[in-house]
Structure formats: structure tokens, C-alpha cells
Amino acid sequence: ALARGIPVVTTEVGAEGIAEGRSDTVYLSACDAGFVDRVVEAAHDPAAAERSGRGRKLIEERFAWTGIVDRLTELYGKD
């Protein structure tokens, strides 16, 4: 969903490896009641599109081939 620019509601565990600690890209919740609140917030938040756009950018940077190649090039020190 992040790659498609769709608002994502998840837990800290669900965001691990993707958007951990990135409350600017996903709606995070620690409990069931909070999860429902975050879904309602995502549905009514005028800034949801902007947040989703940051999520899409995060996915592109971390998981698109161009981002992977850039990180590997940096890791191995080759231009």
C-alpha cells in the first residue's frame, strides 16, 4: 500500500523493516482501540495524501532497484 501511495495503518511490529519509527509516513498504533482511531484518522485526515506520498518515497528509496544499487555502490565505494 505504501508503494501505491495509499494510507497505511499499522503497529510498530507491522512497520518493522519498512517504516519503523516513521510516524510521518504511516499511522502507528500500539493497541486495538488506538488502531481503530488511526483508521478513522487516516480516512478523514486532509494530510493523508501527503503522508502517503512520503511513504511511497520511502519505499522507492529503500526497495526500488535504483535505491538498492545506490546503496550497494556506496557500500562498495565504486562510482
Image (cartoon, rainbow, N blue to C red):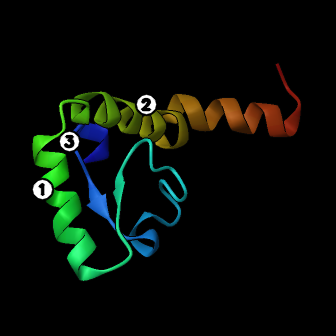
Residue 21 in picture, x, y percent from top left: 55, 57
Residue at 18% across / 39% down in the picture? 45
Figure quadrant of residue 14: bottom left
- The residue furthest bottom is 32
Closer to the chain start, of discs 3 and 1, is 3
For badge 2, the amino acid type reads: Lys
| Circle 2 crowding by C-alpha within 10 Å: few under 14, some 14–19, many from 20 | some
Q: Which residue is mark 3?
A: 6
Q: Which residue is mark 2?
A: 57
Residue 75 in picture, x, y percent from top left: 82, 40
Whole-number angstrom distance, CA of label 2 to CA of label 3: 12 Å
Residue at 36% across / 50% down in the picture? 26
Q: Is residue 78 above or below residue 65?
A: above
Q: Is residue 51 left or right of residue 60?
A: left
Residue 40 - label: 1
Q: Nearer the viewer, residue 76 or 10?
A: 10
Is there CB contact under 8 Å for labels 3 and 1?
A: no
- The residue furthest right is 77
Closer to the chain start, of discs 2 and 3, is 3
Whole-number angstrom distance, CA of label 2 to CA of label 1: 24 Å
For badge 3, the amino acid type reads: Ile
